[in-house]
Image (spheres, rainbow, N blue to C red):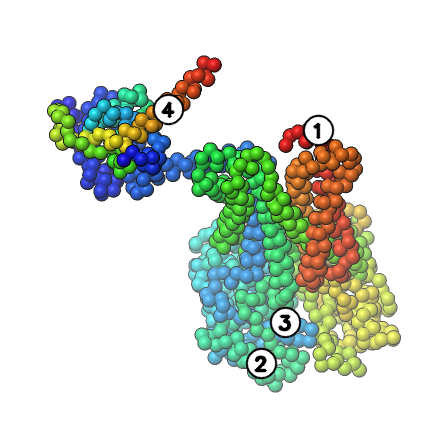
Amino acid sequence: VSERAPGADRARALYRRLLSLYPATFRARYGDDLLQAFDDRRTEPRFRGTLGGARLILFLLRDFMTSVPLAHDRRPGRGVGLIMTDLWQDLRFSTRMLVKNPMFTLAAIATLALGIGLNAATFSAVQGILLRPLEGTERPERLVQMYRQWPGIEFGSNSIPHYQDVRDRTREVFESVAGWIFQPMAIAGDGTSERTIGMLVSANFFQTYGVQPLLGRAFVPGVEDRDPGAHPVAVLGHGYWQTRFGADPSVVGRTISINGHPYEIVGVAPEDFRGPISFAAPPIYVPLMMQRRIDASRDLIASRGSNSMNVVGRLRDGQTLAQGQAILDAILMQLRDEYPESYDDQLGTRLVPQNEAGIHPSFGSAQMGMGTVMMVVVALLLLIACVNVANLFLARARDRRHEMGVRLSLGAGRPRIVRQLLTESLLFSALAGLAGLGLAALGTQMLGGFRPPIDGPWDMRIDMDSTVLLFTAVVSLGAGLVFGMAPALHAASPDTASAIKGESDRGRGRSRASSALVVIQISLSLLLLVTSGLFLRSLQSATDIDPGFEEPRSLATMAADPGLQGYDEATGRQFWDRMLEDVSSIPAVGSASLAWSLPLGLNSSDRGIEIPGYEFGPDERSSIAYTYVSEGYFETMGIDVVDGRVFTRSDDADAAPAIVVNRRFAERFWPGESAVGRLVGTAGEQREVVGVVETGKYGSLGEEAQDFMYLPYRELYQSAMIVVARTAGDPQPVMERIRALVRELDPDLPVYDVRTMEDHMGIALLPARLGGSVLGLFGLLGLTLAAVGIYGVMAYSVSQRKRELGIRVAMGADRPTVIKLVLGEGMKLALLGTVIGVAGALGAARLVQGLLYNVSPLDPIAFTGVPLMLVAVAALAVYLPARRAAAVDPMKALKTD
Amino acid sequence: MTDADALDRVLPLSPTTFHILVSLADGPRHGYAVAREVEELTDGRIVMGPGTLYGSLQRMVAAGLIEEADNPGEVGLHSERRRYYRTTPLGAAALRSESDRLLRAVNVAQQRLEA
């Protein structure tokens, strides 16, 4: 005892305390003995001194680690320690199995990861854009969007006076009713100027959505919704506050310039509220009452007929959608009495719950249809992937029958083998799930970064949420367990003797399972390919459509709005005259003109007309799409003149009001007669038709022929115009030159949409392009997977039948006969899959019908070309093993088994 | 007592169990002495800490391979407080059967190595 170090008893006390790690019974029985053994150990020479002390600590630590779990295990002869060792062994063995077969592992993991990744990304997108309730708002389920119906317009917008009446007369049903409208603005401050698309909102906008500003205040209802022009204040969107103002908290109270007028920043919106729609984030909000100051060219505040505002209401507790509908209908009746002219053509009102509105309710079934199609497509792809993984595992399980048999006969317990297989499956699942998650993150990022080729504060809210993560986990685990375990369990079944001998007694049954999987795969990928084929055909026919103007590739466009910079009509006219002159004198420009809007853009406007002597039917649409153009427009665009003349420079405010209409317009109102010289009442005047031009495409390439009319820009000045120039050769330098010209005239004036007409038309082709390329890609993936699947199954079946084929060759069958035999068997599967797939595709085609241009959902080319291609690919996948089968050396084949 | 069923249940012996039985073959020992003996028998390859030692002894008692014994008359430091162990007939039979098996295995190995 004498040699004990002074601190020794503290060490003993510590050891005694640590003994509480053991179960109480063990401690009660052996506690003294353990302490005694501790004392004994400490007297040993190797555990003395500083180094010995360290050695003792390590020694005891190891002792605790191995003995504590064992002491807690009640089962005799088993222990946690052993289980841990087993698990570690399993894991190491599993890793070795996966690495040993790298092609198998890569193929299976890549396949499943692709399926999972695509599903998660698509689900994120659909969820983010269409399904998720509006972020950052309070109880979004109580919000409803309000629309007005006119003949031909299901979900029409509201005017400011109409909105004010609705807001004031529905208080018993709606807590509050707000309105908003996108508005281009030129924002200047600290020496920079930029054009952005902000939002004009009613003063109760933030209250209605239940949004508290992060900094400062929101607008004040009852104050900032009165006295037009008296509230030069603005609330910043959170993102804009961060990017433009560096998240400076002192921004509240600062003054910025909007369209040349000073505004005080009074607040900053919170981060989670990114505006009233799910795919754009307005950088700045300004009270509706400032509309005239922002855009002097039109007066929305006073005009009951200018319908361009979105209106949203919050239902009071206890009030239902039906009650909301009822009160809106009642108000419509009142308003009809009060303002018969403004309301006599309105058919009714529509209420849409905020959560069901999607991008815009007028896309209605199409947007949900597209969302559904995408989800179904990627789910099919995941299914194909799973089938492939199942097939791969099935093939491997057959390979491992021998291994399992050996292990079983050497005394490995079945539970032990099952646990080993389980570990392997879980390891596989974890790897595939992680890879899938990586792909999903990549895909989500790409989708979220997608910007439509249209001007706007786009901000797709696509991110992976917990649902997606859960989904990924469930799919990968499920796939790993079901597809990894099931075949493996079979392989571990008791019939070990024949397994060791290499007899494939059950081979027949299992290859039937593989065959079924191949048939499923082929039919699924055919379904995908036919659908994408339809989209590609649709894209093709859309590009073939004559838009009604010539060679969009050599048309250069540039848009600007001097009104945003505070130009009045006189200086604005000067600016545009100068631009037209300068652009026309660019040597590469053949002709140039001004237009208020271009065909196949997104913003179309229409207005009511009256035709003397023509009575509109009750449901007949009396408003016609239009634009303002300068002289030279039809020549520049290459639109054919059918009758009469086009506008000239002298069609200005001093001339008699003129109008040009398209052929369809003329044939609708004056069938069989010349339209020239007829009168059309619109834009406040009786206008004389001076010319008729060919009908083109205005809203979309797929549209039916539409009425259209052109108003003279020189008579009816507009501030926001587009320069269109027909160029000879490359339009790029011309566009650069136009940009430079604007800079010379006014360096502060923001320009936008500098592009060719072809790029502008990209918008119209976007749905077909997106649908075609995405589905095409998916279809190709499906085809590849199916080809791999059928190849694997056929190759296996050939290797199983080596002996039989050897006998056939020995009996005198020649190469072509053997090839035919194997090929025939594989092709039977391929054809069966094709037939089933075509049947499925017929159903799927009906689903996407609404998204196709000029293509029948039963398009013969898609329905014959695609199956033929698929059969060809399948034939190749079968031919390779068939050739190998024919090369079988009968002697060898008979000997080996 | 040494019926085949009981023997089957405890066989094969783990190396630690085997060596503990060997160390007790020539008479009862106390726990620490068992640990030292096993260490010596295995040239220091099996070194048991207190927890491992008494855990193994407890499980072997439960399996009926060893049992607690009286102090065989040793005198020395804390001898009177120590717990002593000795083999049971089952433990002896298990040790015999295991060493026979090992011997056969060793013989076969030796023959083949010489051949």
In primary-sequence order, the first of circles 1 and 3 is 3
The chain that hosts pointer 3 is A
Q: Residue furthest top?
A: B114
Q: Compared with residue A106, is residue B103 higher up or lower down, i.e. above or below?
A: above
Q: Name the residue that disc number 4 marks.
A: B102
Q: Residue A730: horizontal and vertical position, in percent?
A: 77, 46
Residue at 55% across / 34% down in the picture? A500
Per the image, label 2 sits on a secondary structure element best described as: helix
Question: Closer to the camera, A510 or A678?
Answer: A510
- Seen in the picture, residue A539 relative to A33 is either above or below; the reply is below
Q: Which residue is mark 3?
A: A156
Give the residue drawn at x 59%, y 69%.
A309
C-alpha separation, residue under disc 1 versus residue under disc 2: 90 Å
Q: Residues within 10 Å of mark 2 (few under 14, many from 20)?
A: some
Q: Nearer the viewer, residue A519 or A201?
A: A519
Identify the residue shown where x is 71% and y is 81%: A618
Q: Chain of mark 1?
A: A
Label 4 amino acid?
Leu
Q: Secondary structure at mark 3?
A: strand
Are dots 2 and 3 on a single chain?
Answer: yes
What element does badge 1 sit on? helix
Residue A857 position, x and y percent, is 73, 61
Place of residue A744 in the rendered image (x, y in percent of width and height, measured from the top left): 68, 50
**Left or right, residue A739 beside residue A501:** right
Q: CA distance from mark 1 to mark 3?
A: 81 Å
Q: Which residue is mark 1?
A: A891
Residues at marks 4 and 1 on the same chain? no
The amino acid beneath tag 1 is Met
